[in-house]
Image: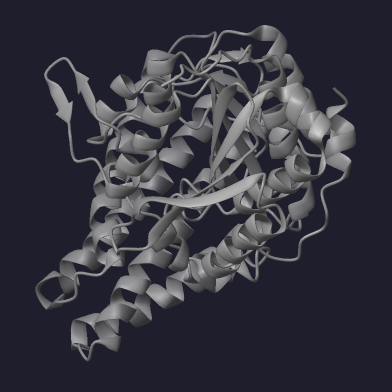
Amino acid sequence: MNVAEYMSRVPGYAAFPSVDALYAELDAAAAAHPDLVKVRHIGASRLAEPLRVLTVGDGPADAVVIGGPHPNEPVGFHTVTTLITLLCQDAALRTRLGYRWHFLACADPDGARLNEGWYGRPGDRRAYAEHFYRPDLADQVEWTFPLTAGDYRFDRTLPETAALMRLMDEVEPSFVCSLHNGEHQGAFFYLNRDDATLAHRLAELPGLEGLPLHYGEPELPGSQPIVPAVYATPSGARVGAAFGAGASSADYAARFGALHLVTEVPMWADERVSDKTETGTGYQEIVAAAMAARRELIDTLETALSAVADDLTVRSPFRRSTEATLRTFRTLTEHADEHSESLSGPDRLDRPATVAERFDHRQSVHLFRLRLLGTFLRMLDAEIAAGNPTPAIHTQRRLLAERLDRWVQEAEADSPSPATEIRKLVAVQLGAILLAAAGGAPHKRRES
């Protein structure tokens, strides 16, 4: 299969679609191809938003593609509609892949609607921070599948996750792909099989679009690479239990023996993230600086939260995210500290850092600063909008807005590269789906 040729067909995009616009595209595809495409509801979100699944084709095996598993990661919206168009127009491709495709185009429509303020300005880092929303791990569709790990048990499955579970139970997929994107990093993937051939081919895809691979630190400390920038999927037992969440879609897909792929593509790309050149700075020094900045962020926001805690009256999603994410971020920082200590010795800590490592550690500081502070400010704005502008809330709103100005300026100075063309991001995700689907040895569904 000439995956590069399919990638070249991806059109240009200026922005990300709203939830309503995305659903309109699904309805249009169903109307244009009534004998091939079906749209149905598989459940409802926490705010009673219908969860729509679009099914294409009639292959002997089933594939599930999850768009927007995190609401600040909308690249997959375009990838889903692009792949739907290809499948509808290319009967030979449908036959070659051999799947009946099920697309949950927007896994968290409630959260997506809270990010729509920046969807129309995808390259604007300030807009991204000011309109950012992401629930904490235990409120994410991707990380609330049931989990039992030793004495740890998670059974607070979200309605959206339960709907996705029902879909997988129904179709028993051979292949599941969860479409994620990051911020200022390189492209990377998670794969639940130790398939070096597929991993190498996945790692080649970003270069076809001029995107760098991620050679900085793993997203989750201790993740094991199959090849550079393609990691073995971490188990829910390790991640969920550590952060008070559940299992992932990969854990649930394993029930069916499915190949599971996660794509991670960067909204901003910088070649430094794939530069293995040694710097004049010690690795231990850059880790210590990043940890110090993380602790400063936690202390700053915990102090601000304490200053307004008695005045908060609105149970907004921003408040829930702020309070829970601060706890999770502290746990993540502690885990990163422990991981660094486990790497002690001349082979790891006492060596020069690479350009990629130095860049990635600094970017992680900017990422968490802008995410957490942006959500904190939205929490305060919800109070003010509800008619609760107490002196403490008003004061913290002013002080933190000034800090946001400073942190945005620092982030932009550290990483002045422009936003990645959306088309390139979609093309890499599309190529990854096609590669995995073509090489995943699908099994036929059982007849009911």
Is 236 left, or right, of 254 in this rendering? left
Q: Relative to 403, is 177 above or below?
A: above
Q: Relative to 173, is 324 above or below?
A: below
Question: Which quadrant would the C terminus be assigned to in this image?
Answer: top left
Is 264 left, or right, of 233 in this rendering? right
Q: Is residue 203 visible?
A: no
Residue drawn 82% across the image and 58% down it: 12
Q: Residue 139 in the image: state x and y as whole percent.
A: 29, 48
Residue drawn 42% across the image and 76% down it: 401
Q: Residue 447 in the image: state x and y as whole percent.
A: 46, 18
Which quadrant of the figure has residue 124? Answer: bottom right
Q: Is residue 350 visible?
A: yes
Q: Which of these two is toward me, 69 or 162?
A: 162
Which quadrant of the figure has residue 278? Answer: top right
Is 25 left, or right, of 434 in this rendering? left
Q: Relative to 114, is 327 above or below?
A: above
Question: Which quadrant would the N terminus be assigned to in this image?
Answer: top right
Q: Residue 262 in the image: state x and y as whole percent.
A: 56, 31
Residue drawn 29% across the image and 30% down it: 240
Q: Residue 165 in the image: state x and y as whole percent.
A: 35, 34
Q: Which of these two is toward me, 205 or 379?
A: 205
Q: Which of these two is toward me, 181 or 221?
A: 181
Q: Which of these two is toward me, 159 or 52?
A: 52
Tell me the colour scheme of the image.
Answer: one colour
Which quadrant of the figure has residue 214? Answer: top right
Report how many numbered discs are placed on residues in the image.
0
Residue drawn 56% across the image and 29% down it: 63
